[in-house]
Image (spheres, rainbow, N blue to C red):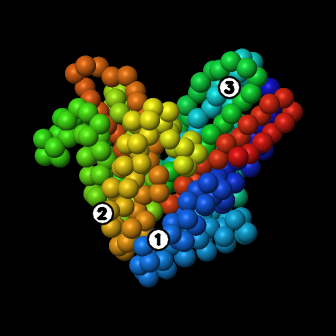
């Protein structure tokens, strides 16, 4: 295994400065096919102009460059220890180059590390050893605003009329969107995990963000629920940045996780319009970003 620090640095730079094509397409479609509300239209126009400037000038899309979350799938022969060292070195270099803002603040002392390197939880790195010979590294940069409005529910919830079924999942998802209002920097995207324990449910709800916008669950009933949640969320008329209008949620993805019979958690993670997601794929000598 060679030194991949430069390749990971480029992954971070691209993620911070350039929205993926599917996310940009969803924003453009929202602008072109919105409800005609002039304020909503102006906000979306400003967002798209921001996207253009960030890409052209290679500067961060948002002043909050987010928590770096890595999902690493590696074949036999790679070392998770060495990959961790390379990722951390790339994070420090990207911070020094201003592609990342120094965000790692000690929860107890308030001290900022200055280079985005904290304890073993910051940056967040999840490893999975896989068959084959291809290494993939998915990176999410998840801003604090959209992270703050994520919610976890323990069903049944009498107040929300949410039982332990798909109707209950819909009800709590819409509650999460309603509670977020403009603080989630809409129009946004939902990642929903049904099941697991509290920790695995949160992790799964974020991992689902590595999938393309517009993709749906392979089970037709769950896919229909994803579309239903998106459509019903837009009927809340929260609108871009909370100023009103229809474009509030541009996509919903649901994932299931095995749970204990005693627990039924539904975790709703929110991703803002600055849906910063990129993938690095390394196969032999070939390196590809998508």
Circles 1 and 3, Cβ within 8 Å, touching? The answer is no
Which residue is at 29% across, 33% downward? 265
The reply, left or right, for residue 137 in relation to residue 276 is right
Assign a secondary structure to mark 2. loop
* Tag nearer the camera, 1 or 3: 1
Residue 144 visible in this rendered orientation of the protein: no
- The image quadrant that residue 161 belongs to is top left
Q: Earlier in the sequence, mark 2 or mark 1?
A: 1
Which residue is at 80% across, 26% downward? 1
31 to 230, vertically: above or below: below
Circles 3 and 2, Cβ within 8 Å, touching? The answer is no
Distance of mark 1 from mark 3, alpha carbons? 42 Å
Distance of mark 3 from mark 2, alpha carbons? 42 Å
- The image quadrant that residue 154 belongs to is top left
Residue 198, position as x, y percentages in the image: 33, 32
3 to 102, vertically: above or below: above
Distance of mark 2 from mark 1, alpha carbons? 14 Å
Residue 250, position as x, y percentages in the image: 47, 57
Assign a secondary structure to mark 1. loop
Label 2, on which residue?
236
Nearest the viewer among 181 and 59 is: 181
Label 1, on which residue?
34
Which residue is at 45% across, 32% downward? 219
Q: Residues within 10 Å of mark 2 (few under 14, many from 20)?
A: some
Label 3, on which residue?
74
Assign a secondary structure to mark 3. strand
Q: Which numbered marker is on residue 225?
A: none
Residue most toward the right?
A: 285
Residue 73, position as x, y percentages in the image: 64, 28
127 to 138, vertically: above or below: above
């Amino acid at each position: 295994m060679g030194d991949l620090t430069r390749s990971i640095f480029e992954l971070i730079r691209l993620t911070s400065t350039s929205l993926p094509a599917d996310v940009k397409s969803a924003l453009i479609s929202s602008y072109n096919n919105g409800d005609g509300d002039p304020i909503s239209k102006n906000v979306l126009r400003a967002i798209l102009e921001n996207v253009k400037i960030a890409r052209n000038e290679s500067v961060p899309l948002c002043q909050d460059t987010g928590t770096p979350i890595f999902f690493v799938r590696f074949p036999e022969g790679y070392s998770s220890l060495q990959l961790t060292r390379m990722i951390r070195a790339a994070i420090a270099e990207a911070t020094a180059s201003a592609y990342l803002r120094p965000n790692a603040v000690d929860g107890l002392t308030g001290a900022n590390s200055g280079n985005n390197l904290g304890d073993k939880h910051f940056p967040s790195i999840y490893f999975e050893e896989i068959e084959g010979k291809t290494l993939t590294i998915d990176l999410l940069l998840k801003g604090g605003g959209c992270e703050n409005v994520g919610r976890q529910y323990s069903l049944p919830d009498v107040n929300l009329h949410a039982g332990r079924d798909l109707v209950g999942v819909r009800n709590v998802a819409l509650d999460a969107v309603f509670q977020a209002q403009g603080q989630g920097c809409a129009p946004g995207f939902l990642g929903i995990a049904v099941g697991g324990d509290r920790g695995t449910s949160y992790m799964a709800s974020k991992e689902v963000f590595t999938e393309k916008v517009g993709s749906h669950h392979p089970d037709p009933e769950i896919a229909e629920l994803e579309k239903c949640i998106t459509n019903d969320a837009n009927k809340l008329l929260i609108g871009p940045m909370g100023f009103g209008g229809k474009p509030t949620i541009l996509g919903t993805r649901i994932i299931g996780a095995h749970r204990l019979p005693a627990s039924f958690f539904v975790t709703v993670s929110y991703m803002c319009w600055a849906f910063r997601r990129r993938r690095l794929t390394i196969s032999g000598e070939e390196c590809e970003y998508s």
